[in-house]
Amino acid sequence: MKKKIEALSGMYGGRSILLFLVAVLSLSACDNEKAVMPDENIITDEKAIIPAKDQRFTYKISEGDGDHGTLVTRVTAVKDSAGTNVFSIENNYQYEDGSMVLKYKAFSKGGFTTNEIATSAGLDAMYKYVSEFAVIKSSKLTGFPQRQTFDNKGTVGSKVTFSKEPIYQYLELDIPTEDGDVISAEIESAVIYHEGKVTTEESVTTPAGTFKCSKWEFSYDLETRLTSEHFPAEETAVVYTVHLWTVPGIGIVKSEEVSGKDVTKTELQKIDK
């Protein structure tokens, strides 16, 4: 029983809850849309911070605890929406313990690039993930759609903004143990994003080449609470500062997420077709 409690507590503390939330959000995007594959008729805003439709971008992810992963990003489909091309983007994340496919939508309009995550299948994704180790008695997931919007100018002072409503998740669980017992627990978590801006424009060199990038900085709060009759309540509140280097036609070239000594880095390794 103790191991199960420790595993659950660890899962919903630190960065793993963020990864779970991102998975839930991203898996919900684009599932029910009728899109067409990219073709030569698709015209992309040259200043849009969106990956090119005919290329594949491979990243190395380095976690603060020493773990490493690989992320492959590519455009999978494009749909015209009232004259605006909406790109479906797939992130295929391979990590030491398995893999995860994350999806979202992106479009450029009026000089701004927006990444949008819908909610249509969010609860289904959450159920699928959690049901591997627990029985969900009740749940709640709010804060959708979530939008992240970049000013395409990408000059010093250009803003990145987010949806005002936080992402909130509640789960009431029954967790079977190896001893045949059942632990009842409740988990609440919230992610609150804060707007940021471009702090500098600089050249960044990665294994994929040298790029003239806009460096963005923003932050988010991650709050979690785990309660049960079987152990004392656990609460965490962590602030992450994000440094993001972007370039039109690629999107992210490099990123760093920092909270104290915990640093996660993502770096573009190669671009191919």
Image: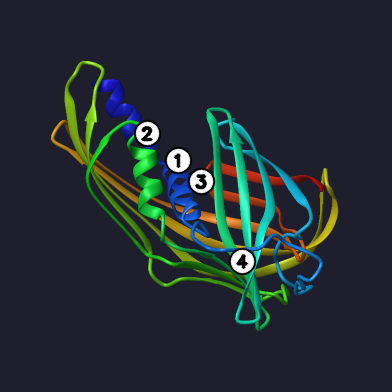
State the residue at coordinates (46%, 71%).
163
Q: Please say whether residue 12 is visible from this viewpoint.
A: no
User: How far apart, in angstroms, are the residues tagged by discs 3 and 2?
Assistant: 18 Å
Mark 1 belongs to which amino acid?
Ser
Q: Secondary structure at mark 3?
A: loop
User: Is tag 4's residue or tag 1's residue first in the polypeptide sequence?
Assistant: 1
User: How far apart, in angstroms, are the residues tagged by discs 4 and 2?
Assistant: 33 Å
Mark 4 and mark 1 residues within 8 Å of each other at the beta carbon: no
Q: Which residue is mark 2?
A: 10
Q: Quadrant of residue 158?
A: bottom right
User: How far apart, in angstroms, are the residues tagged by discs 4 and 3?
Assistant: 31 Å
Q: Estimate how packed mark 1 is, as few (under 14), some (14 to 19) or many (20 or more) residues with alpha carbons within 10 Å.
A: few
User: Is tag 2's residue or tag 1's residue first in the polypeptide sequence?
Assistant: 2
Q: Which residue is mark 3?
A: 260
Q: Nearer the viewer, residue 121 or 96?
A: 121
Q: Give the percent coordinates (x, y) of residue 76.
A: 66, 55
Mark 2 and mark 1 residues within 8 Å of each other at the beta carbon: yes
Q: Estimate how packed mark 2 is, as few (under 14), some (14 to 19) or many (20 or more) residues with alpha carbons within 10 Å.
A: few
Q: Secondary structure at mark 4?
A: strand
State the residue at coordinates (58%, 43%).
263
Q: Which mark is residue 106?
A: 4
Horizontal relation, residue 118 to residue 169: left or right: right
Horizontal relation, residue 135 to residue 147: left or right: left
State the residue at coordinates (32%, 36%).
131
Q: Residue furthest bottom?
A: 110
Q: Which residue is mark 1?
A: 16
Mark 3 belongs to which amino acid?
Gly
Which quadrant, please, contains the N terminus? top left
User: Is tag 4's residue or tag 3's residue first in the polypeptide sequence?
Assistant: 4
User: Is tag 4's residue or tag 2's residue first in the polypeptide sequence?
Assistant: 2
